Image (cartoon, rainbow, N blue to C red):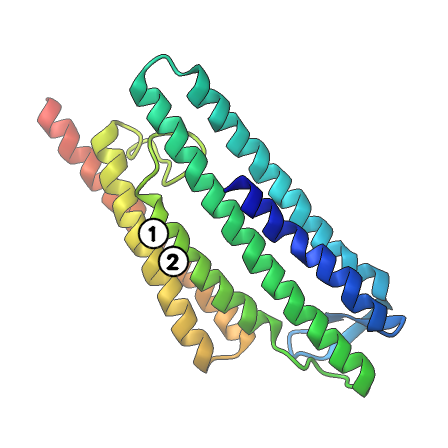
Amino acid sequence: MKKIMWFAAIIPSVITCIVLQFMPDTIPMHYDLAGNIDRWGSKAEGFVFPAIILLVTFFWHLMIRAFEKKAIKAETEKEQMEAGSNAKLLCIVGLSQAIMFGIMHCFSLYSSYMEANSGSTRAVVDIAKVSCILCGAMLIVIGNYLTKSRINSTVGLRTAWSMYNDTTWRKSNRICAISLMAAGLLTIVTTVFASGAVSTVLLLVYILLATIVSCVYSKKVYDQEMKKNS
Protein backbone atom coordinates (compact mmCIF):
# COMPACT_ATOMS: atom_id res chain seq x y z
CA MET A 1 0.00 0.00 0.00
CA LYS A 2 2.87 2.39 0.75
CA LYS A 3 4.28 1.82 -2.74
CA ILE A 4 0.91 2.68 -4.28
CA MET A 5 0.74 5.80 -2.09
CA TRP A 6 4.17 6.95 -3.29
CA PHE A 7 3.27 6.13 -6.89
CA ALA A 8 0.18 8.33 -6.63
CA ALA A 9 2.28 11.09 -5.03
CA ILE A 10 4.95 11.04 -7.76
CA ILE A 11 2.53 11.12 -10.71
CA PRO A 12 1.73 14.88 -10.34
CA SER A 13 5.45 15.72 -10.60
CA VAL A 14 5.81 13.61 -13.75
CA ILE A 15 2.70 15.15 -15.33
CA THR A 16 3.95 18.64 -14.46
CA CYS A 17 7.32 17.98 -16.08
CA ILE A 18 5.53 16.98 -19.30
CA VAL A 19 2.80 19.63 -19.35
CA LEU A 20 5.04 22.59 -18.55
CA GLN A 21 6.99 21.92 -21.76
CA PHE A 22 3.93 23.16 -23.65
CA MET A 23 3.09 26.06 -21.32
CA PRO A 24 3.92 29.73 -21.94
CA ASP A 25 6.65 31.11 -19.67
CA THR A 26 4.06 33.07 -17.66
CA ILE A 27 0.84 31.46 -16.41
CA PRO A 28 -1.97 32.34 -13.94
CA MET A 29 -0.97 31.49 -10.38
CA HIS A 30 -3.71 32.91 -8.15
CA TYR A 31 -7.38 33.90 -8.28
CA ASP A 32 -9.64 36.07 -6.13
CA LEU A 33 -12.92 34.85 -4.64
CA ALA A 34 -14.79 35.85 -7.79
CA GLY A 35 -12.54 33.68 -9.94
CA ASN A 36 -10.58 36.57 -11.47
CA ILE A 37 -6.88 36.06 -12.07
CA ASP A 38 -5.02 38.37 -9.69
CA ARG A 39 -1.46 37.06 -10.07
CA TRP A 40 0.63 35.68 -12.89
CA GLY A 41 3.97 33.94 -12.37
CA SER A 42 6.65 31.76 -13.86
CA LYS A 43 5.52 28.35 -15.03
CA ALA A 44 8.29 26.93 -12.83
CA GLU A 45 5.97 27.66 -9.89
CA GLY A 46 3.88 24.79 -11.19
CA PHE A 47 6.26 22.47 -9.34
CA VAL A 48 5.35 23.93 -5.94
CA PHE A 49 2.17 21.90 -5.43
CA PRO A 50 3.72 18.58 -6.56
CA ALA A 51 6.55 19.25 -4.08
CA ILE A 52 3.99 19.83 -1.32
CA ILE A 53 2.28 16.55 -2.24
CA LEU A 54 5.59 14.72 -1.88
CA LEU A 55 6.30 16.37 1.48
CA VAL A 56 2.85 15.49 2.82
CA THR A 57 3.26 11.92 1.59
CA PHE A 58 6.64 11.71 3.32
CA PHE A 59 4.95 12.79 6.55
CA TRP A 60 2.37 10.01 6.21
CA HIS A 61 5.19 7.59 5.38
CA LEU A 62 6.92 8.42 8.65
CA MET A 63 3.68 8.00 10.61
CA ILE A 64 2.96 4.66 8.94
CA ARG A 65 6.51 3.49 9.58
CA ALA A 66 6.16 4.40 13.26
CA PHE A 67 3.07 2.19 13.64
CA GLU A 68 4.73 -0.62 11.68
CA LYS A 69 7.70 -0.55 14.06
CA LYS A 70 5.29 -0.48 16.98
CA ALA A 71 3.59 -3.59 15.60
CA ILE A 72 6.92 -5.38 15.31
CA LYS A 73 7.93 -4.49 18.86
CA ALA A 74 4.49 -5.26 20.33
CA GLU A 75 4.58 -7.64 23.26
CA THR A 76 0.98 -8.83 22.91
CA GLU A 77 -1.15 -9.86 19.95
CA LYS A 78 -3.66 -7.12 20.77
CA GLU A 79 -1.01 -4.38 20.61
CA GLN A 80 0.28 -5.82 17.35
CA MET A 81 -3.20 -5.81 15.78
CA GLU A 82 -3.88 -2.28 16.98
CA ALA A 83 -0.65 -0.90 15.52
CA GLY A 84 -1.10 -2.84 12.29
CA SER A 85 -4.68 -1.66 11.73
CA ASN A 86 -3.69 1.95 12.39
CA ALA A 87 -0.80 1.68 9.92
CA LYS A 88 -3.21 0.40 7.26
CA LEU A 89 -5.64 3.24 7.95
CA LEU A 90 -2.87 5.82 7.60
CA CYS A 91 -1.94 4.24 4.26
CA ILE A 92 -5.52 4.77 3.10
CA VAL A 93 -5.45 8.38 4.31
CA GLY A 94 -2.10 9.07 2.64
CA LEU A 95 -3.16 7.43 -0.62
CA SER A 96 -6.51 9.25 -0.68
CA GLN A 97 -4.82 12.58 -0.03
CA ALA A 98 -2.20 12.01 -2.73
CA ILE A 99 -4.90 11.13 -5.27
CA MET A 100 -7.07 14.08 -4.27
CA PHE A 101 -4.22 16.60 -4.47
CA GLY A 102 -3.00 15.05 -7.73
CA ILE A 103 -6.39 15.43 -9.42
CA MET A 104 -6.69 19.01 -8.14
CA HIS A 105 -3.26 19.79 -9.58
CA CYS A 106 -4.18 18.32 -12.98
CA PHE A 107 -7.29 20.51 -13.13
CA SER A 108 -5.16 23.49 -12.10
CA LEU A 109 -2.63 22.79 -14.88
CA TYR A 110 -5.41 22.46 -17.44
CA SER A 111 -7.01 25.70 -16.27
CA SER A 112 -3.69 27.58 -16.37
CA TYR A 113 -2.92 26.26 -19.85
CA MET A 114 -6.29 27.30 -21.26
CA GLU A 115 -6.20 30.73 -19.59
CA ALA A 116 -2.62 31.49 -20.63
CA ASN A 117 -3.26 30.58 -24.28
CA SER A 118 -6.60 32.34 -24.55
CA GLY A 119 -5.64 35.47 -22.63
CA SER A 120 -8.54 34.95 -20.24
CA THR A 121 -8.83 37.06 -17.10
CA ARG A 122 -11.06 34.56 -15.29
CA ALA A 123 -10.63 30.97 -14.17
CA VAL A 124 -11.67 28.42 -16.78
CA VAL A 125 -12.21 25.77 -14.09
CA ASP A 126 -13.68 26.44 -10.65
CA ILE A 127 -10.93 24.72 -8.65
CA ALA A 128 -12.85 25.31 -5.42
CA LYS A 129 -15.74 23.18 -6.71
CA VAL A 130 -13.34 20.46 -7.82
CA SER A 131 -11.55 20.45 -4.47
CA CYS A 132 -14.85 20.30 -2.54
CA ILE A 133 -16.05 17.30 -4.54
CA LEU A 134 -12.71 15.57 -3.99
CA CYS A 135 -12.76 16.41 -0.27
CA GLY A 136 -16.26 14.96 -0.06
CA ALA A 137 -15.09 11.75 -1.72
CA MET A 138 -12.10 11.61 0.63
CA LEU A 139 -14.36 11.97 3.69
CA ILE A 140 -16.42 9.04 2.46
CA VAL A 141 -13.33 6.88 1.94
CA ILE A 142 -11.81 7.77 5.33
CA GLY A 143 -15.14 7.24 7.09
CA ASN A 144 -15.43 3.81 5.50
CA TYR A 145 -12.10 2.76 7.00
CA LEU A 146 -12.27 4.68 10.28
CA THR A 147 -14.06 1.88 12.14
CA LYS A 148 -11.01 -0.33 11.60
CA SER A 149 -8.77 1.85 13.76
CA ARG A 150 -7.84 0.87 17.32
CA ILE A 151 -7.19 3.09 20.33
CA ASN A 152 -4.25 5.38 19.61
CA SER A 153 -3.21 9.02 19.89
CA THR A 154 -2.95 9.70 16.14
CA VAL A 155 -5.84 8.23 14.14
CA GLY A 156 -9.61 8.48 14.67
CA LEU A 157 -11.85 10.41 17.04
CA ARG A 158 -9.48 11.07 19.93
CA THR A 159 -11.21 12.50 22.98
CA ALA A 160 -10.85 11.66 26.65
CA TRP A 161 -14.28 10.03 26.38
CA SER A 162 -13.65 7.92 23.27
CA MET A 163 -10.27 6.72 24.57
CA TYR A 164 -11.69 5.53 27.91
CA ASN A 165 -11.79 1.89 26.78
CA ASP A 166 -12.24 -0.28 23.68
CA THR A 167 -16.03 -0.01 23.78
CA THR A 168 -16.14 3.79 23.88
CA TRP A 169 -13.51 3.93 21.14
CA ARG A 170 -15.37 1.51 18.87
CA LYS A 171 -18.79 3.12 19.29
CA SER A 172 -17.49 6.69 19.10
CA ASN A 173 -15.51 6.08 15.93
CA ARG A 174 -18.40 4.21 14.33
CA ILE A 175 -20.61 7.28 14.72
CA CYS A 176 -17.73 9.50 13.62
CA ALA A 177 -17.35 7.36 10.49
CA ILE A 178 -21.05 7.64 9.67
CA SER A 179 -20.97 11.39 10.30
CA LEU A 180 -17.95 11.89 8.04
CA MET A 181 -19.49 9.85 5.23
CA ALA A 182 -22.71 11.85 5.54
CA ALA A 183 -20.69 15.09 5.45
CA GLY A 184 -18.83 13.86 2.38
CA LEU A 185 -22.02 12.90 0.55
CA LEU A 186 -23.70 16.21 1.40
CA THR A 187 -20.60 18.07 0.21
CA ILE A 188 -20.63 16.34 -3.17
CA VAL A 189 -24.37 16.88 -3.68
CA THR A 190 -24.44 20.55 -2.68
CA THR A 191 -21.25 21.37 -4.60
CA VAL A 192 -22.97 20.34 -7.83
CA PHE A 193 -25.52 23.11 -7.33
CA ALA A 194 -23.46 25.79 -5.54
CA SER A 195 -20.46 27.94 -6.39
CA GLY A 196 -16.98 27.04 -5.24
CA ALA A 197 -16.93 29.66 -2.48
CA VAL A 198 -20.32 28.60 -1.10
CA SER A 199 -19.37 24.92 -1.37
CA THR A 200 -16.20 25.52 0.64
CA VAL A 201 -18.18 27.17 3.44
CA LEU A 202 -20.72 24.33 3.42
CA LEU A 203 -17.91 21.77 3.54
CA LEU A 204 -16.52 23.37 6.69
CA VAL A 205 -20.02 23.51 8.21
CA TYR A 206 -20.62 19.82 7.47
CA ILE A 207 -17.29 18.83 9.03
CA LEU A 208 -18.01 20.96 12.09
CA LEU A 209 -21.44 19.37 12.52
CA ALA A 210 -19.95 15.89 12.07
CA THR A 211 -17.37 16.69 14.75
CA ILE A 212 -19.99 18.00 17.18
CA VAL A 213 -22.27 14.99 16.68
CA SER A 214 -19.34 12.61 17.16
CA CYS A 215 -18.11 14.31 20.34
CA VAL A 216 -21.60 14.50 21.87
CA TYR A 217 -22.19 10.81 21.17
CA SER A 218 -18.72 10.00 22.52
CA LYS A 219 -19.62 11.67 25.82
CA LYS A 220 -22.91 9.75 25.93
CA VAL A 221 -21.16 6.41 25.42
CA TYR A 222 -18.57 7.35 28.05
CA ASP A 223 -21.28 8.14 30.59
CA GLN A 224 -22.92 4.78 29.88
CA GLU A 225 -19.65 2.96 30.45
CA MET A 226 -19.02 4.83 33.67
CA LYS A 227 -22.44 3.77 34.98
CA LYS A 228 -21.68 0.13 34.15
CA ASN A 229 -18.40 0.28 36.04
CA SER A 230 -19.76 2.13 39.06
Query: Residue at position x 68%, y 58% from top?
Result: 12
Pointer 1 residue: 144
When asked about the image quadrant of residue 20, the answer is bottom right
Query: Residue at position x 31%, y 30% from top?
Result: 163
Residue at the right extreme, as displayed:
25
Q: Is residue 211 left or right of residue 8?
A: left
The quarter of the rendered structure image containing the C terminus is: top left
- For the question of whether residue 118 can be seen, the reply is yes
Q: Amino acid at mark 2?
A: Ile
Q: Identify which residue, 228 or 14, lies in the foreground.
A: 14
Mark 2: secondary structure: helix
Q: Which mark is residue 140?
A: 2
Q: Residues within 10 Å of mark 2 (few under 14, many from 20)?
A: many
Query: Does residue 97 lie above or below 90 as drawn?
Result: below
- Distance between mark 2 and mark 1 Cα atoms: 6 Å
Query: Residue at position x 39%, y 74% from top?
Result: 189
Q: Is residue 197 left or right of residue 163?
A: right
Q: Identify which residue, 97 or 199, lies in the foreground.
A: 97
Position in image of residue 127 (x %, y %): 61, 72
- For the question of whether residue 204 can be seen, the reply is no
Mark 1: secondary structure: helix
Q: Amino acid at mark 1?
A: Asn
Position in image of residue 172 (x %, y %): 26, 41
Do the residues bearing badges 2 and 1 touch, measured as CB atoms within 8 Å? yes
Q: Residues within 10 Å of mark 1 (few under 14, many from 20)?
A: some
Query: Residue at position x 51%, y 33% from top?
Result: 64
